[in-house]
Amino acid sequence: MNTKEKIIYESLNLFSTKGFDAISVRDIANAVGIKASSIYNHFKSKYEIFDTIIGRYSEHINNFFHYMKMDTNQNNIMINKFEWVSDEQFFKKIITLFKFYLEDEYVVKFRKILTIEQYNSSKIAILYNKLFIDDILTFHTTVFENLINLNILIKRDPYTLALQFYSPLFLMFSKCECITDKELIYLRKHISEFKDVYTMKG
């Protein structure tokens, strides 16, 4: 890891534990093991470091969705009918997504930063809502719209379906620090009941 990467990594650690405003450039430099003035060889300011962390988060998310074969470009979201019909396949995909948001080091630390700073900055509050609520609801809305158009789901407002599907997951996501057997059982029940109610019969 070169010096620039160490600056980003240590800044992420510090911001996620104490918040953005509480950390100085000197704090970051001490964590990296360099002089404070050396930070400016790589970044113009602490704000530029934070902007870089945001950019890295977006890249990290996009890479994960590409790996999952779930294009985050809403015009290209493709639904595998087999994955929806098969309880086990669909459950496996949802659990993989859930664990990613709950256990991935970068995602967890970035979410902690936004959770802390949303009360200090309206800009960060908007970013938190966008990344962890609005974007995910929009994604699920598009997924359910496609499933409705494929006559897999009964005809309902897709945004309402997204709210009904994601709200319990967001509540669990907000209260859990790790996924346990109890949460897995609840998730399986939630997914199974949702599918049973909204999948077309016959």
Image (cartoon, rainbow, N blue to C red):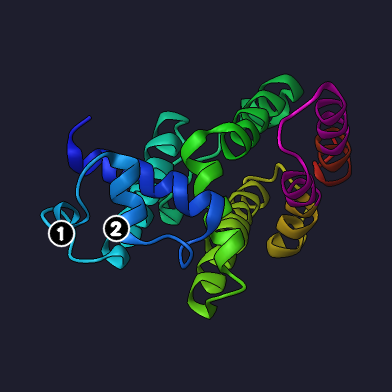
Which residue is found at the position 36% from the left and 53% from the top? 27
Q: What percent of the width, then of the height, locates residue 133?
A: 62, 60
Residue that protrudes farthest toward the left in the picture: 41
Instruction: Indicate the secondary structure of the residue bearing disc 2.
Output: helix
- Residue 52 relative to residue 4: left or right: right
Residue 3 showing in the rendered view = yes
Check the image and name the residue furthest to the bottom: 122
From where the camera sits, is residue 142 visible? no
Classified by dominant secondary structure, the portion drawn in magenta counts as: helix
Q: Residues within 10 Å of mark 1 (few under 14, many from 20)?
A: few
**Residue for badge 2:** 49
Marks 1 and 2 sit apart, C-alpha to C-alpha, by 10 Å
In x, y percent, where is residue 6?
27, 38
Which disc, if any, is residue 40?
Answer: 1
* Residue drawn at 66 percent across, 33 percent down: 94
Q: Is residue 183 magenta?
A: yes
Seen at 71% across and 41% down, the residue is 152
Residue 166: x and y in percent read 73, 51
Viewer-closest of 90 and 2: 2
Amino acid marked by disc 1: Tyr
Q: Quadrant of the C terminus?
A: top right
In the rendering, at what x and y percent does residue 124 appear? 50, 70
